[in-house]
Image: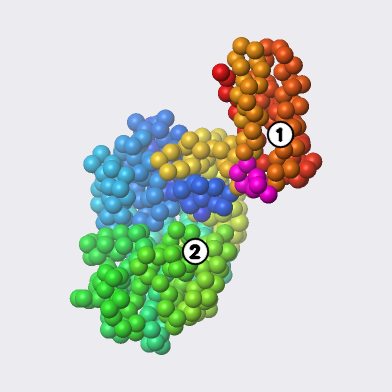
């Protein structure tokens, strides 16, 4: 039996795992990741599924753990290539359905709703689901029984003893799986660095109630769109204090609508209103729930903070609550948004100690509890950057799992297991595919390098017209600058550059038949050296030769 991480190892995002026995494959999750600062212009990142496409006739289905983007966001790009059935809980598939409809492929996909207690037979794989707690309802872990042994994928989880929806983790099922024997556990590593336990989501509810009690004017609360438990607690507080709630931000509106339709979000009559209706209400009766807790440039809260939102602007005295901690790498974006909000007169509540956010992932003591209940022979830490995986391995060693039985894997590795042994048995094609607008995979490292160069040093375009028969320069060279220098203020420099290019051309052409591709390279190299000597910059240089 083989386990192959397609994505989700050594990174946060694009979670996808393949389990293979002989000629049958089961896929768990199909997520995306959001681009880093170096991925200029990229919208999302998805896993390279070359291995799955090559073996698509062997795939029995895709089973989903929950409805976060890093677990379902890749489906619109995956399903057209694989054409396999998808299995998930009601809310998870509700979010998937909306996503597929936006990509105009819903009619071509087979979605099957499962309940946490359901069992499926997908080829040789017997699949069982068990309820877990996370920052989105309807989260499940998955147990896959194979002829070699049982694999348990925990999904993203924490052990919340007082969950908002009053549905705790199914401890009984976990213990039963451990009693019957688990060969391999694949366990969430996101908070493996954090000692102790993760606080209950209900702790946030108490903080939100206190904010509502003391706020004198409007309350604007930003959180992850998918955190339905937190949205529920905001709506509950609004009902208690007789405030009206408007939802702002496309993803937030979509999730709230789906959660309401499926019964996962309960709203007292008349509480939800359109954002335009808030203008006619007293400020102390208005609440806005919005996206932008990570300072995303185009999110609603960021535009509100910059006074660029069409319908919402900060009124001095507003209370703005950022109910999330910055994802690593987003700290500067969040800080800039907070500064802008303060500058417009808002009272911003954002500190971790303010109690307006708790994690949806297990800390070290909960990871130990999961391992003690499952008692797996082998552990594959998943869903974390490399340091998280290492910390998880150390936690596993403390509860008695042999270090040799913990696999710190890499995406694309084939981890092969028998009832008695486990080993790395090669690798498959893996990596990242960049999505830019409607283009999937057409932007690679060379394009990103060019974008980085353009963003840092600009571009110089050298244009000239030549006689095709005589190779004589008829017009030019003209030099155009974008993002390098402002031409009118640097006329002397540009004139010197033009003279330098002219000398290079005269030397290269010299009255003979010319290979203009060679000349273009000579112009590029010569002008690059000239600019470096003069300015110590390296703009992109693009020679353009038109033949007449």
Using a 10 Å C-alpha cutoff, classify the residue at mark 2 as few (fewer than 14 neighbours), some (14 to 19) or many (20 or more).
many
User: Image check: 164 left or right of 394?
Assistant: left
Residue 269, quarter of picture: bottom left
Residue 154 vertical placement versus 307 (above, below): above
Q: In the rendered structure, which disc, 2 or 1, sits on the residue that comes first in sequence?
A: 2
From what the image shows, is residue 57 above or below residue 409? above
Tell me the mark number nearer the camera, choosing from 2 and 1.
1
Q: Is residue 244 left or right of residue 6?
A: left
Q: Nearer the viewer, residue 347 or 4?
A: 347
Q: Quadrant of residue 215?
A: bottom left
In the image, 473 versus 403, the foreground residue is 473
Query: In the rendered view, would you say 93 is above or below 420?
Result: below
Q: Residue at x 34, y 76 (%)?
A: 287
Q: Which of 179/79 is in front?
A: 79
**Residue furthest out toward the left:** 269
Q: Is residue 453 left or right of residue 375?
A: right
Q: Magenta residues?
A: 481-489
- Residue topped by disc 1: 498
Q: How is the image coloured?
A: rainbow
**Residue positioned 35% across, 44% down in the render:** 76
Identify the element where label 1 is drawn. helix
Q: Which residue is mark 2?
A: 295
Which type of secondary structure does the marked residue at label 2 adopt? loop
Q: Quadrant of the C terminus?
A: top right
Question: How many marks can you see?
Answer: 2
Measure the alpha-carbon separation of dots 2 and 1.
44 Å
Q: Residue at x 21, y 76 (%)?
A: 270
């Amino acid at each position: 039996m083989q386990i192959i991480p397609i994505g989700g190892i050594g990174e946060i995002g694009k979670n996808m795992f393949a389990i293979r026995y002989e000629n049958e494959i089961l896929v768990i999750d199909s997520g995306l990741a959001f681009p880093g600062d170096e991925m200029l212009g990229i919208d999302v990142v998805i896993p390279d599924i070359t291995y799955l496409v090559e073996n698509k006739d062997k795939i029995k289905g895709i089973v989903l753990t929950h409805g976060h983007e890093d677990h379902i966001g890749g489906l619109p790009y995956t399903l057209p290539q694989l054409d396999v059935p998808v299995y998930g809980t009601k809310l998870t598939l509700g979010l998937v359905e909306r996503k597929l409809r936006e990509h105009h492929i819903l009619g071509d996909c087979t979605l099957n709703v499962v309940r946490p207690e359901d069992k499926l037979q997908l080829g040789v794989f017997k699949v069982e689901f068990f309820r877990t707690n996370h920052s989105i309802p309807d989260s499940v872990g998955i147990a896959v029984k194979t002829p070699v042994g049982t694999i348990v994928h925990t999904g993203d989880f924490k052990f919340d003893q007082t969950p908002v929806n009053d549905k705790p983790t199914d401890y009984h099922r976990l213990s039963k799986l451990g009693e019957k024997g688990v060969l391999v556990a694949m366990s969430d590593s996101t908070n493996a660095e954090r000692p102790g336990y993760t606080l209950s989501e209900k702790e946030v509810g108490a903080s939100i109630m206190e904010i509502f009690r003391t706020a004198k004017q409007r309350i604007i609360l930003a959180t992850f769109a998918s955190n339905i438990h937190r949205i529920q607690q905001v709506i509950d507080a609004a009902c208690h204090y007789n405030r009206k709630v408007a939802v702002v931000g496309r993803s937030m509106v979509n999730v709230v609508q789906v959660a309401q339709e499926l019964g996962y979000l309960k709203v007292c009559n008349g509480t939800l209103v359109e954002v335009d209706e808030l203008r006619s209400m007293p400020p102390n009766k208005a609440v806005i729930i919005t996206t932008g807790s990570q300072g995303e440039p185009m999110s609603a809260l960021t535009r509100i903070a910059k006074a660029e939102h069409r319908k919402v602007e900060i009124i001095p005295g507003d209370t703005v609550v950022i109910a999330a901690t910055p994802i690593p790498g987003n700290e500067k974006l969040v800080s800039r948004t907070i500064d802008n909000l303060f500058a417009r007169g808002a009272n911003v509540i954002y500190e971790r100690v303010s109690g307006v956010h708790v994690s949806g992932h297990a800390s070290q003591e909960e990871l130990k509890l999961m391992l003690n209940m499952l008692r797996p022979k082998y552990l594959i830490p998943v869903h974390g950057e490399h340091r998280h995986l290492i910390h998880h391995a150390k936690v596993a060693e403390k509860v008695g799992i042999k270090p040799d039985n913990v696999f710190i894997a890499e995406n694309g590795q084939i981890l092969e297991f028998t009832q008695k042994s486990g080993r790395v048995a090669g690798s498959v094609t893996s990596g990242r595919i960049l999505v830019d607008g409607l283009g999937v995979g057409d932007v690679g490292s060379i394009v990103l390098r060019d974008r980085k160069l353009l963003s840092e040093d600009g571009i110089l375009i050298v244009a000239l017209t030549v006689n095709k028969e005589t190779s004589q320069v008829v017009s030019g060279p003209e030099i155009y600058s974008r993002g390098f220098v402002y031409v009118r203020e640097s006329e002397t420099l540009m004139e010197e550059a033009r003279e330098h290019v002219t000398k290079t051309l005269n030397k290269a052409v010299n009255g003979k038949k010319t290979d203009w591709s060679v000349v273009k390279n000579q112009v590029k190299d010569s002008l690059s050296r000239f600019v470096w000597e003069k300015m110590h910059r390296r703009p992109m240089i693009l020679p353009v030769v038109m033949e007449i």
